Amino acid sequence: MNKIMRRYIYIVFTLALLLAVNSCEDFLTTKPLGVTSEEVFYSEKGVNALLTGAYAHIDGCQATDGGLCWAGAVSNWVFGSVASDNSYKGTSFTDQSSINPIERWEVLTENNYPENRWRQNYDGIERVNNMLKVMAQVDASALSDAKRSQYKAQALFLRAWFHFELKRSFNNIPYITEDVEDPGAVSNTIDAWPLIEADLTYAYQNLPNRQTEVGRANKWAAAAVLARVHLFQNDFTAAETLLDDIINNGGFTLVTDWHDNGRISGNNNSESIFEIQYAVNDGSYGSSSAGWGDCLNFPQSGDMGLCCGFHQPSQNFVNAFKVDANGLPLLDTFNDTDLKSDQGVLSSETFVPFTDVVDPRLDMTVGRRGIPVLDWGIMRGKDWIREQPNGGPYIYKKNLFYESEKNSLSTTTGWAVGVNANNFRAYRLAHVYLWKAECAAQRGDLATALDYVNRIRNRAKNSPVVMGLCTMYELPSIAAYEGYVDYDQPAANYMVEPYPSFPDQAYALKAIRHEMRLEFGMEGHRFFDLIRWGIAEQTLNAFAQADTRIRSFMQGAVFNSNHDEYMPIPQSQIDISVGALVQNPGY
């Protein structure tokens, strides 16, 4: 939720505190400072305030507590991208060094990143359950059955959301409901999937098609998350039923321009099913409601002057955008050789970008030398990278704002000056289309699978490409390339075409999985997808071995099946659970 709503919840809690303290009759019955009375919330307004507080936690962040925010970020940039073949941690080796073992699949039980991810999501669950317990005490005269059902449906959506985040990372988790008296005594040896499904099913059946308040979950958001939960269990039949409902009845359409899913002006567009709402300069120092979990993931060096150089695209990811003479991906051979990069080349030295033909979504997603980055100018290579030997030569673009939006739609306070109002698109119609294609391919309907994949590829084909062909190859300053950029020409050699056919099921599934990578790259899905597809070990070990061509960091890294798919249960949580929590295998 945005900062206005967070301020609202703060005001409500403050008023409640004052009421609680002032109502005490004598010193002996005065509540300690900072403790409010639950009864203050026994009204529709109070229940809604508590629900708002639960929504405020969905971005995985509490104020600007970096250690918690970065691990809990809704974008899953650490656990979904850096742990995969899509991105490097980036920046310097020693900065946020706890991420290094996650990138190499060598996580120990005391690592603070899994611990903080655990804490953040269970904090969100606690907020939901507190709201449900309070709502149970509200008299029917103060809250109608219809409103009660709506609030409950939103709460259960959020509770399932937080548990789903935990399930994907830790697998064996305790499922905490409002009826649990001692959460610390709940075992993690139960199967959480049916409980997640039950909460989402209630939400799907009871939420409206649209909410009047932007950012609140509706029927289609619940359907999308529930479909994904089924996909994680390989229940393609159940998933496809929900996906069909969204496609046929949800009223969503693909935006014409692919860029609209990555820029602020495209927030909450016709393709969006559920977005995390970001807001800047709303009274909070550092704009804590502007995706602060990703505040490290902006270029630190160069003209931008942002922070802090984390979450850099991998060479393997860049290579994935290669196409053949027909504009189709090189599904099996894309990483045999590397597209030319400026790794190790100074900005003042000569570097001519490659002329290979690539899918245009490469330069819509990745910033690379010699190519314009939105309206910031030509990306000048090493001068724009905080520590190129460790993080590679590329920067991430999807969460970036335009220079013309600086200070109006980006924060004007705090040290993390990259945070901005570009929402995180958690679920959009493109997800649904490609999941539909996957389900169709799994049951052998290759024609339907082809149709939905090509809808995504045709949109990419027809979207405007990055413009601005630069013919200056030494780029130490803006002045160096002034007059050497033709903004009427494409910045590179682009081509993307639809598939003419899927010859068999194996080819179809490979094509669909590759398309997901191209369309949603760096959005925190890749690692979890590799796990659910059962191809993590072969994919990630091949990546690690080849990546030594670029940098030494992955030398000797090995992904081991039946162990590295999930994070360890934080040792601190096992210690305080007094036997209720069991460690994951192998840790």
Image (cartoon, helix red, strand yellow):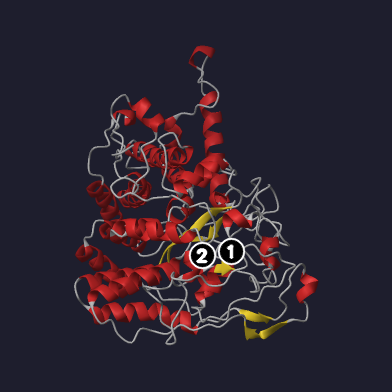
Q: Nearer the viewer, residue 380 or 245?
A: 380
- Secondary element under disc 1, as helix, strand or loop, is loop
Q: Nearer the viewer, residue 158 or 377?
A: 377
- The amino acid type, in three-letter code, at marker 1 is Tyr
Which residue is situated farthest in the top direction here? 28
Mark 1, residue position: 394
Task: Name the spot of residue 158 as percent of width and height, x first.
Answer: 38, 49
Residue 9, labelled with which disc?
A: none
Report the Cα–Cα distance between label 2 and label 1.
8 Å
Name the side, left or right, on which 91 lies relative to 314. Answer: right
Residue found 58% across the figure and 56% down from its top: 391
Task: Name the spot of residue 67 as percent of width and height, x first.
Answer: 54, 40
Reply above or below: 306 against 348. Answer: above
Q: Nearer the viewer, residue 519 or 280?
A: 519
Residue found 43% across the figure and 76% down from its top: 254
Name the side, left or right, on which 396 lies relative to 147. Answer: right
